Image (cartoon, coloured by chain):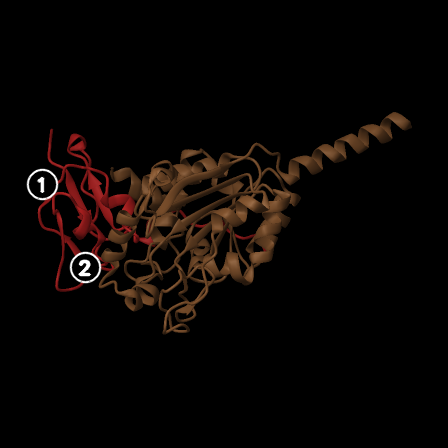
Chain colours: A red, B brown
Amino acid sequence: MGRNRVVVYPDWCKGCGICAAFCPKKVFAVGQDGKARVVNEEACVNCGFCEPHCPDFAVLVIPGETDQTPCPPETAPDPAEQPAAKEVKP
Amino acid sequence: MAEITQLIHQYLRHNKKFPLVFCPGCGHGIVLGSLVRSVHALGLPKDDVVIVAGIGCSGRIAAYVDFNTVHTTHGRALTVATGIKMANPKLTVIAVMGDGDAFSIGGNHLIHAARRNIGVTALVLNNFIYGMTGGQCSSTTPEGAYSHTCPQGQLESAFDIVELTRAAGAAGVSRGTVYHVKELDALLAEAISRPGFNLVEALTPCFTQYGRGNGFKSAVEMFKWLKASCLPVERYEKLEDRTGKLPIGTFVRRDVAGLETRWANMRQALAAKKGGAA
C-alpha cells in the first residue's frame, strides 16, 4: 500500500485552521501566508475528516492504494477547462 | 476520500468567483458540501433539483451550485418553493434559509408550510445571529448571548425550532451540526426523500459576528464547542443535567402525504365524479 497523498488548493483555502486543529495525525499547519499547508503527509491515515469539513472544498486526499492516479494540479480547476455552461436560447 | 472534494467540484458553477464569499471558518460551505453529497447519494439528476434561497449569507449558497436555483426576497423562500412544488410536483424542491430568514421575517410562512405539509425540504442554517447585516440579535440568539443590538446580553428567550415545527405539524424535523457532518448528510438525505414538509436545522458557527462577541477566540473554538455541546437525542434524553447541551438527530417522523399529492388525488377524484355523472 502506497502512502496517501494530501493536497491543499491554496487559491481556495482561507486559512480557517479547521483541518490543522482537528486532524488526528497533525498533517496540516496554517502557514504565515494564512493558508493551510501539508507538513506531515506521511502520517495521513485517510480518516476522512478533513475533506467534508473543509468549508472551501480546498483539501484533497488521495488514498495510497490508487498510486497510479496522476497527481492533481496544485491549483483549483481552471474554469476554461470545465464543460461550457448551457447556452441560453435567445 | 479524494472523491468527496472532486464530487463537490463537479456540482459547482465554475464560472462564479471562488473561493466562496463566506468568512474564514464559516460553516455554510460545509452545509453546501453536505447538500451536494446527499443529493448525489439519492441519485437525483441536477435538472430535477430546485434550490430556493432567501436573503442572507445562506442565500449565497444557491449561486454556487449547478442545480435549478432561485434567489428570492427576504423570508419568502418557502412561498416560492411552495409555488414551484405545486406547479411541478416531480421536482425536488429544497429551500435554503438562514435563521432570520426562516424564523423571523418568514416565520409565518414556515409554520403554514409545516401545517399544510407541502413537499418541500427546508434547510435552515442557524448561526444564532444576523450575520450579513452586521450582527444584530435574531430570534434564535440564545438567552444571555451578546450581539451588537444586545450588548448587555439577550433578554428574550430563543425559539425552540424543533418544538415549533413539531407543533405546526411538519412531517419531519431534524437537527444537525457542521461538526457532525456525516450525520448531517444522512439527515438531509432522509429529509429529502420523506414526503411532506421536512425541516433540517443545521447549526453553523458564525465566528465573525457571533463568536467574537461571545468569548470564542477562533472559528476552531466554535467547532470545538459544537463538538462538546451537541449529542444524539437518544443520549440527551437520558441526561439529568441538560444545561448547555443540545440534542441532534431526527425528532419528528410522521407519515403524511404532501399537499401536492393530496391535491392531485382530489383532482383525480373530481374528474372521475364528473366523468361518471356525464
Q: Amino acid at mark 1?
A: Ala
- Cα–Cα span, label 1 and label 2: 20 Å
* Residue A59 locus on image (x, y percent): 23, 48
Q: Is residue B80 visible?
A: no
* Residue A62 locus on image (x, y percent): 20, 38
Residue denoted by label 2: A35
Q: Total label count?
A: 2
Q: Amino acid at mark 2?
A: Lys
Residue furthest out toward the front: B240
Residue denoted by label 1: A43
Towards the viewer: B216 or B72: B216
Towards the viewer: A47 or B10: A47
Residues at discs 1 and 2 both on one chain:
yes
In the rendered structure, which disc, 1 or 2, sits on the residue that comes first in sequence? Answer: 2
Vertical position of residue B96 compared to residue B256: above or below: below
* Residue A47 locus on image (x, y percent): 20, 37
Q: Secondary structure at mark 1?
A: helix
Relative to B185, A69 lies left or right: left
**Position of the N terminus of chain B by quadrant:** top left
Q: Secondary structure at mark 2?
A: loop
The subunit letter for the residue under badge 2 reads A
